[in-house]
């Protein structure tokens, strides 16, 4: 599928509700469980998504659209959430994510982006030149990847409990 802003927004606007429906008011065994050392729980995923809303997608989009002399993206600390959110309740993170996402999508919509703007470039510190369309497509894929991660981690909490059905549940061994 080629990048389409409207189709992207249809996914991006749903992510907070999907996470809330999946995780709100669940016991911590579900939301704080992970896949082992140095892996993320669903709680951690939500914290990471909050960080991305605050410091990644729209700040980088603004760098691209400004087309200033320095189009290098500010660094993104992929692990900041592990320090910042450790003792916060999940409900607070879900609320913050939804609030930030609504604001960011409103800001994105106000930009009235067309093909010319989507083709503008910025400089990723690792990948080099990237377009605004690529950044926005990555935002969508990032959401979907972390939704899959959260559900995979939750499924693995029952890896042993399912007994022989594990043979039919590949998610438990990914």
Image: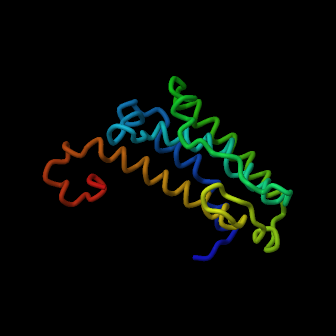
25, 127: nearer the viewer: 127
Q: Say if 88 sits above or below 160 in the image.
A: above
Name which residue lies at 82% across and 59% down.
65
Q: Residue at point 79% right, 54% down?
A: 63
Q: How is the image coloured?
A: rainbow
Residue 172 or 51: which is nearer the viewer? 51
Q: Would you identify the image quadrant in which residue 119 lies?
A: bottom right
| Quarter holding residue 4 | bottom right
User: Residue lying furthest left in this view?
Assistant: 164
Q: Is residue 47 left or right of residue 121?
A: left
Locate the N terminus by quadrant: bottom right
How far from the left and from the top, in percent, is residue 82? 51, 33
* Residue shown at 62% from the left, 76% from the top: 2
Compared across the picture, whether 17 is left or right of 74 comes to: left
Give percent across and percent down for residue 72: 74, 54
Q: Please name the residue shown 59% across and 46% down the image.
A: 16
With respect to residue 150, does 3 lie above or below?
below
Quarter of the picture holding the C terminus: bottom left
- Residue 66 at x, y = what percent? 85, 57
Between 122 and 169, the residue placed more toward the observer is 122
């Amino acid at each position: 599928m080629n990048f389409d802003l409207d189709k992207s927004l249809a996914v991006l606007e749903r992510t907070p509700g999907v996470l809330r429906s999946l995780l709100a008011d669940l016991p911590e065994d579900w939301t704080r469980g992970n896949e082992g050392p140095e892996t993320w729980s669903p709680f951690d995923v939500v914290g990471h998504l909050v960080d991305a809303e605050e410091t990644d997608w729209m700040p980088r989009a603004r760098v691209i659209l400004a087309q200033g002399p320095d189009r290098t993206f500010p660094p993104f600390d992929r692990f900041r959430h592990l320090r910042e959110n450790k003792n916060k309740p999940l409900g607070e993170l879900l609320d913050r994510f939804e609030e930030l996402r609504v604001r960011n999508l409103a800001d994105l919509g106000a930009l009235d982006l067309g093909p010319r703007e989507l083709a503008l470039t910025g400089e990723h510190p690792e990948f080099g030149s990237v377009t605004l369309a690529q950044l926005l497509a990555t935002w969508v894929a990032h959401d979907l990847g972390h939704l899959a991660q959260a559900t995979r981690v939750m499924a693995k909490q029952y890896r042993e409990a399912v007994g022989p059905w594990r043979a039919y549940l590949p998610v438990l061994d990914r």
